[in-house]
Image (cartoon, helix red, strand yellow):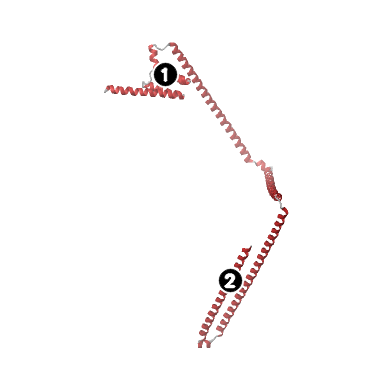
């Protein structure tokens, strides 16, 4: 049982050792000084790196990273070479060389750090000077604004007025400039349109010449002229016809409206007269009519007459509408026939 546990422990240590070695090699390749340091220190603490520090130092040298090599050598000395030194296995010359190399690297590192610190100090100084300049500038600006806001002397000497006039002058200049700009744009537009028209003219001219080159120029011209004349006459005739028909229609509609107005006027007049007559009759009396009951009879009779008249008027209007519709249909048919032949 104990043997199995020991074997398991040994296997675990081997795996761990291998993993640390691999990690060391990768760290050396990547040039990560901190990782290398941590791996060596951590590995040595748990006893996983005994004499491997030298191997790692060789990896560092192979990678060409002096700083990593230095850390690895230091670590190797601390953790694995110490025992060899005590036993007298390490030669004094090698030891001295290693120590000299380490001292040299440390010195270089210190010098580098000092340089960085010097640069940082210089940057701080520059920032302070910049802040000082900024404060000075702000102070000056503030004083200038205060002086500007005062201006009693200016107002007393009438400078305000001058400034106003200056502004007016500037305004006039601006207006003039805008006007000139507008004129220029207008001229440019006109030029463009002119060029466009010229191009169109040239295009038409080229087209005409092309047609002439094809032959039969005079004949074509005559035919074209004849067609144009006919077309013009036709257009003119149709236009005049339309105008005439329109006028006729308007006159007819006007007469119709006038007639309607006269009829309406007549009806109103008759109605007024009838109303007035009845009012007078009522006023004059009519005791005899009331006694004999003729008033009632007359009313009924008039009512019947009114109904009869209303019915007749209604029928008359119906007849008129019928005639109008008939005329409209006739016109439509006539128009269709004309358009078919055009």
Q: Which residue is mark 2?
A: 326
Q: Is residue 40 left or right of residue 330?
A: left
Q: CA distance from mark 1 to mark 2?
A: 123 Å
Q: Are marks 1 and 2 in contact (CB under 8 Å)?
A: no
Identify the image quadrant of the N terminus: top left
- Residue found at x 54% / y 80%: 308
x then y, percent, for residue 181: 68, 46
Query: SS for tag 2?
Result: helix
111 relative to 282, above or below:
above
Q: Which residue is mark 1?
A: 55
x then y, percent, for residue 212: 71, 50
179 relative to 55, above or below:
below
Q: In this rendering, which labeled residue sits more in front, label 1 or label 2?
A: 2
x then y, percent, for residue 156: 68, 43
Query: SS for tag 1?
Result: helix
The front one of 176 and 325 is 325
Label 2: few (<14), some (14–19) or many (≥20) C-alpha neighbours in 10 Å:
few
In the rendered image, which quarter is residue 51 located in?
A: top left
Q: Is residue 181 left or right of residue 287?
A: right
177 relative to 39, above or below:
below
What numbered label is drawn on residue 149? none
x then y, percent, for residue 218: 73, 54
Q: How many labels sit on residues?
A: 2
Identify the image quadrant of the C terminus: bottom right
In the rendered image, which quarter is residue 83 located in?
A: top left
- Residue found at x 55% / y 76%: 315
């Amino acid at each position: 049982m104990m043997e199995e546990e020991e074997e398991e422990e040994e296997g675990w240590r081997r795996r761990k050792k291998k993993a640390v070695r691999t990690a060391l090699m990768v760290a050396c390749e990547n040039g990560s000084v901190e990782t290398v340091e941590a791996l060596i220190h951590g590995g040595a603490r748990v006893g996983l790196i005994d004499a491997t520090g030298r191997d790692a130092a060789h990896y560092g040298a192979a990678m060409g990273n002096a700083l990593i090599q230095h850390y690895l050598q230091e670590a190797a000395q601390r953790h694995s070479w110490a025992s060899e030194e005590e036993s007298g296995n390490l030669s004094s010359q090698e030891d001295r060389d290693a120590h000299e190399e380490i001292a040299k690297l440390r010195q270089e590192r210190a010098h580098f750090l000092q340089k960085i610190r010097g640069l940082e100090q210089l940057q701080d100084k520059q920032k302070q000077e910049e802040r000082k300049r900024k404060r000075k500038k702000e102070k000056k600006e503030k004083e200038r604004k205060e002086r500007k806001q005062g201006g009693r002397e200016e107002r007393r000497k009438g400078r305000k007025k001058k400034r106003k006039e200056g502004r007016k002058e500037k305004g006039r200049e601006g207006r003039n400039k805008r006007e000139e700009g507008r004129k220029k744009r207008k001229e440019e537009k006109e030029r463009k349109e002119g060029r466009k028209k010229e191009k169109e003219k040239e295009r038409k001219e080229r087209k005409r010449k092309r047609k002439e080159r094809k032959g039969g120029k005079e004949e074509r011209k005559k035919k074209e002229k004849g067609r144009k004349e006919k077309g013009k006459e036709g257009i003119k005739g149709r236009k005049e016809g339309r105008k005439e028909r329109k006028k006729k229609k308007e006159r007819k509609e006007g007469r119709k409206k006038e007639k309607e107005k006269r009829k309406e006027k007549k009806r109103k007049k008759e109605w007024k007269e009838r109303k007035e007559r009845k009012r007078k009759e009522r006023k004059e009396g009519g005791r005899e009519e009331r006694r004999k009951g003729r008033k009632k009879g007359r009313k009924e009779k008039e009512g019947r007459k009114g109904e009869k008249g209303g019915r007749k008027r209604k029928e008359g209007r119906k007849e008129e509408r019928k005639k109008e519709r008939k005329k409209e249909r006739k016109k439509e048919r006539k128009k269709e026939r004309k358009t078919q032949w055009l």
